Image (spheres, coloured by chain):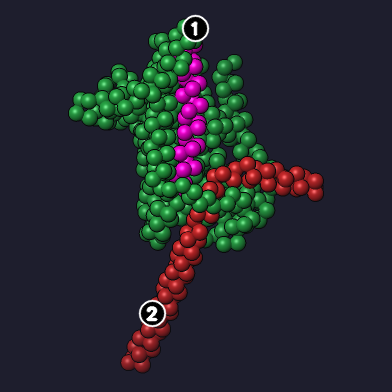
Amino acid sequence: MSSHATSLPADAEKPATSPWLSWALVITLIYLLLAAVGAIGDGFKMATGNNAKELFAFATNPFVGLMIGLAATALIQSSSTVTSIIVGMVAGGLPITIAIPLIMGANIGTSLTSTIVSLGHVRNGEEFRRAFSAATVHDAFNIVAVAILLPLELAFSPLRHTAEALAGFVASDTGVDMKSINIMKMVLSPASDVLNGAVSWMPGKIWMGVALIIIGIAMILFVVSAIGKVLRTVMVGKAKDIMHRSIGRGPISGMASGAAITVLVQSSSTTTSLIVPLAGTGVFSLKQVYPFTLGTNIGTCITALLAATAISGPTAILAMQIALVHLFFNIFGIAIIYILPFLRGIPPAIATKLAELAQRNKLYVVAYMGGVFFALPLLMIGITQL
Amino acid sequence: MPVNKHRETENRIRELRQSIDELEQQLLDTRKAENAQHETLDHLDEYINAVDTKVSSLKLFWSELKREWASL
């Protein structure tokens, strides 16, 4: 418990408002999130007409798409935001085949947050080594998952086909199906009318569409950040209970608790960052942190699934399909890497080695973070555009 | 032969006792580790906002990096 004061400057927030008010705020923010995703979908349709594929021709190379998703998420520091935007864009006509690598890139990009958080332990060598390995095990797992699943997806499209098969059951072309009444469209139409009204003065459909996209992205950025803050305050007690219960129950329980807490706080960055100082103290080992981190990958998919319910009309199934691709990518990743014994040890081995190097010389940290999350993506995008 | 048999049994008992002691120690260590984990989790509200320490963590790392360079 030595690291409390030194490594965590942010003080614990005590709930200043009543739980009812917090929950009312959460519901309002979810409503705004859904309205924002709908706005991006509508805006994308307006701005591109039927030319979304041509507009995103530069990202038809899957590696470019992967790098765009990675760099965008690393910059925005929120995979929930990026995946929600992607859902909106798919609803607006972005082809699924282009969106899949973007989603995979977002999965890698999101792991930068906990790696940055681990830098707060830099003054204590051993603590830093443990914290950095706990953070980078997430990066390593996500990179290995992409290295396995992206080529498989390009060759056989298992994610697209599985998501396609299931999307039809979950959504219909009139939106999320509930006894043939499009409840979501009905609920979201007031917000949609307000947003459309706000941009109606603009000259031409293209500018109206662009304005809707910008408003939608700004709203998602605000909502995801705000919802995270509110839920962290409201859910900390529940998170504590879940983690207490998972102690001593093995990796499946660890995974389940990681997923459950991420669903509760609607942010994998919060959950993976939370585990970093816990690992830094040495009380939780890398072996225990690893499955917990994988669980956060599953839990974070809830935001894109929620975002997909905002879409109605002919593209509702496609929006649900890309949200399910996100979910299946993470499920398949765990099924392949964690279940196969010869692959299971690779991410912790990479993380351990990286942490040893980081402890030895801080420049390795700069090279790793700058290289993987920014230089490599920009270089690859640049090369493919030559 | 009975003496040898007797010694063998004694040795076996000693080995088994040693194994039990080792297992008990392992169990004790696991319980100690789990108790420490529960104690740490009791302070989870101090860690839940760790995600908000990104900027301060980067600043701290940057100052450490500069200090390390200056000392070279």
Amino acid type shown at disc 2: Leu
Amino acid type shown at disc 1: Pro
Image quadrant holding the C terminus of chain A, namely top right
Chain identifier, colour red: B
2 and 1 marks in contact (CB < 8 Å):
no
Q: A195 and A81: which one is in front?
A: A195
Along the horizontal axis of the image, is A129 left or right of A24?
Answer: right
Which segment is the magenta one?
A207-233
Residue B38, numbered label:
none
> Picture coordinates of residue A249 (x, y %)?
37, 59
Q: Label 1 is found on which chain of the structure? A: A
**Which type of secondary structure does the marked residue at label 2 adopt?**
helix
Q: Is the magenta region chiefly helix, strand or loop?
A: helix
> Picture coordinates of residue A122 (x, y %)?
65, 51
Choose top left, top right, bottom left or bottom right for residue A381. top right
Residue A218 lies in magenta, yes or no?
A: yes
Residue A210 lies in magenta, yes or no?
A: yes
Tell me the residue that label 2 is attached to. B16
Dot 2, crowdedness within 10 Å: few (<14), some or many (≥20)? few
Residue A203, numbered label:
1
At horizontal 43% and vertical 26% (from top left) the residue drawn is: A36
| Colour displayed for chain A in the image of the structure | green
Dot 1, crowdedness within 10 Å: few (<14), some or many (≥20)? few
Q: Is residue A261 visible?
A: no
At horizontal 49% and vertical 17% (from top left) the residue drawn is: A211
